[in-house]
Image (tube, rainbow, N blue to C red):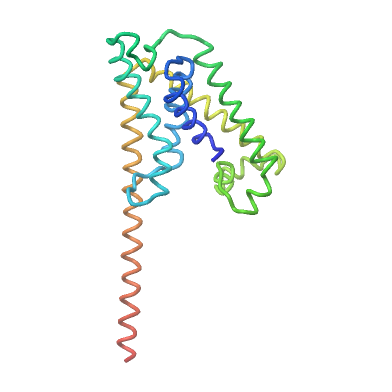
Amino acid sequence: MTDFCYASNTLIIIYLNFYPKSDELFKVCFFFANGALAVSVGAFRNQMVFHNYDNMSSLALHIFPIIVMWNLRWTTMSYEEKLPESERKFMPIDTSFDFYKFFVYPLGCYFMWVTVYFTINFVVAAKRIRSRNYDNLFLYYEKQPWARKVMYKLGPGMAPVIFITCHFIFFFICHCASIICLYSFQWHTCCLLFWLLWSVRNASNFYMEYFARKYELSLQRLEEVEQQLDNK
């Protein structure tokens, strides 16, 4: 639970419950939700499989923040602008470009997470994580042949550094793209619908594979029964 998606969701919960009038924290949460978290729906092949707890919990971690931030940006904040200031829970949206709010604060929060993540996963609890077969983002990609080849190109000692570097590049590209969502209702809505539909598409592939395997298994059992009957 030290992965970026958990840290981002925790930050959003803190913002909503304790600092809803902080424009700085809103923008950090907004860019996190519509950047790396949104793209992770595709990167981790999240699936809208309602009967599977693992699939739904993973999807919820990545898709709910986008939905929450879309609602705040285009519905709640717009509505609250018509209310007296004493009745507002959130600050009015400020779309003016501010280098600190758009880059310094989000990157500062990101590097705070990197520090905690690196310390726990590669220094303090590295042996315990492997011995107890815990899972995290690094071990997930370590199991992918193409990713393992990249991470271990300079040896095992440099694998964590290469992993964090690649994660930062991924985060920064997604972060820059998420800025567009702050200004364009159409773009933001299309992104939200795209990732929702992508999870449905992944779910359809899951069900196709699931039912195909069940059908194969039923055929094998039928053959076994027929052989037993023939032997009799």
Q: Nearer the viewer, residue 45 or 17?
A: 17
Q: Is residue 76 above or below residue 66?
A: above
Q: Nearer the viewer, residue 104 or 166?
A: 104
Q: Is residue 22 above or below residue 5?
A: above
Report the side of 51 relative to 157 (left or right): left
Q: Nearer the viewer, residue 2 or 43?
A: 2
Q: Quadrant of the C terminus?
A: bottom left
x 54%, y 37%: residue: 3
x 31%, y 88%: residue: 230
Residue at the front extreme, as displayed: 86
Corner quadrant of residue 138: top right
x 38%, y 33%: residue: 64
Corner quadrant of residue 81: top left
Residue at the bottom extreme, as displayed: 232
Q: How many marks?
A: 0
Report the side of 143 relative to 73 (left or right): right
| Coordinates of residue 149 in the picture (x, y in percent) | 61, 44
Q: Is residue 51 above or below residue 37?
A: below
| Coordinates of residue 113 in the picture (x, y in percent) | 58, 30
Corner quadrant of residue 216: bottom left
x 43%, y 33%: residue: 39
| Coordinates of residue 213 in the picture (x, y in percent) | 36, 62
Report the side of 91 relative to 144 (left or right): left
| Coordinates of residue 202 in the picture (x, y in percent) | 36, 45
Q: Quadrant of the N terminus?
A: top right
